[in-house]
Amino acid sequence: MTDSLLDALVDICGPGFARLARSVDRVGGHRAGYVAVPATGRAAAAVLRLAADRGLSVRPRGSGSKIDWGTPPSVLDLVIDTGRLNGMWNHHGTTAVVAAGTPVSAVQAALALRGKRLAVDPPSPGATVGGMLAVNEAGPLAHRFGSPAEQVESVTYAEATGAETESDGEDGRPGIAEIDGVLTAALLRLHPLPEARRWLGHPVTTPAAVADLVEQAVIQRLQPSAIEVDLPGAGHGTVAVLLEGDTESVATRAEKLAQVWGAEVVLAQEGPPWWGRYPFGPADVALRISVRPDGLQAVAYALRDLCGTPVTLRGSAAMGTVHAVLPAGLAARRVSEIVMGLDQVLLARDGKVVVVSAPPALATQLRMAEPRDLF
């Protein structure tokens, strides 16, 4: 079976593009059996059809930056690497078709030469378009432009049964969360590259101070592209605002906010080091929390009480979507108790909390976020 399966994968993907898995080909601590690297959507569909016929468990992989998010697989037979599904076309108007395995950074670099961009900034290093869309990975720009899923006109994907399908969405959400298969391409909206960008930051030490600064920024009607907060568990944090547009407008709006925020404000041409980055790593238990902005203060204090110590929070202060890092060394039962306690706080505020990442040994014992939970 081993030789026949590998031969069949080579027949589909080509010599050198199907192989036995190596030690690096792991998901949630499980090593895959095989790796296939199809070059087209049709080839990806053929790989999935072969996997379905043989009853194989499959996991797609882009850059691998989020490969361990969610529930670890109990068995992993085949990884479908999207690295050869790469490129962009039909990008001369207000949209572009981008292959799923294309790094977002490469798309941005190519579009910048034409004075355009995707209004997305996923925090994962090396994130691909497919990986970003699969979990609706939003960065700071979601404040103004919406999540990546909201900027999609349609997607093309290979179904788990091996059929190629295109899905459209009325509100920019073409059923990505419900896709059972591999994303192969997406039709994405383009935006003009801003002439100028300016960040303004203000130090904070408490969740209450965060709420005050965000409110002051919002009521000024400055059309910010992002309002982010970094609130470490211990020490000083920052609320930062990104303003974009023509040079004169950005300067005027920045001056207005600086006057409101006062002497402690810091103006910069680049974002702070934490901007657009997750506050957690593979060894951490990370929560994604969504709540109305006026509920973030209650969330921060509830987490402190549930964990017995201040908890690091980072994310969109004005949208109420943040990530929290739980203290190290907690048992699965304790993590579940914290999540359930926070969920009770969020119920009264129309919010929700999900566990997006955890070490594999813990993840198998927790209720981890599924893709539909992230949309």
Image (cartoon, rainbow, N blue to C red):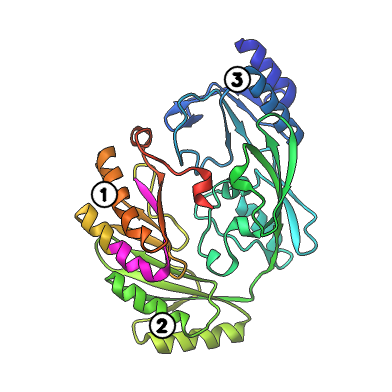
Characterize the local packing of mark 3: few (<14), some (14-19) or many (20 or more) Cα atoms within 10 angstroms: few
Left or right of 32: which side holds 361? left
Q: Give yes or no for contact between labels 1 and 2 (Cβ–Cβ under 8 Å).
A: no
Q: Nearer the viewer, residue 136 or 190?
A: 136
Q: CA distance from mark 1 to mark 2?
A: 32 Å
Task: Please give the name of the residue rendered at 68% of the width and 29% of the height, measured from the top-left corner.
Answer: 161
Q: Measured from the top left, where is residue 110 in percent x and y?
A: 70, 57
Name the residue that disc number 2 marks. 216
- Decide whether residue 293 is among the magenta residues: yes
Report if residue 273 is visible in the image: no
Q: Which residue is mark 3?
A: 55
Q: What amino acid is labelled 3 in the image?
A: Gly
Provide the residue designation for mark 1.
327
Q: What kind of residue is marked 1?
A: Pro
Within 10 Å of the Cα at label 1, are there few (<14), some (14-19), or many (20+) other Cα atoms? some
> From this viewpoint, which residue is outermost toward the front?
348
Secondary structure at numbered mark 2: helix
> Which residue occupies 34% across, 45% down?
284
Q: Quadrant of the N terminus?
A: top right
Q: Position of residue 12 (x, y in %)?
A: 73, 24
Q: Earlier in the sequence, mark 1 or mark 2?
A: 2
Q: CA distance from mark 3 to mark 2?
A: 57 Å
Q: Taking 294 as reference, is 9 above or below it?
A: above
Please state the horizontal and vertical placement of residue 120, each as a whole percent of the image: 59, 60
- The answer to whether 101 is drawn above or below residue 173 in the figure is above
Task: Please report the bounds of the magenta region as a residue range.
Answer: 285-300
Q: Residue furthest left?
A: 308
Q: CA distance from mark 1 to mark 3?
A: 40 Å
Which quadrant of the view contains residue 58?
top right
Q: Between disc 3 and disc 2, whose residue precedes? A: 3
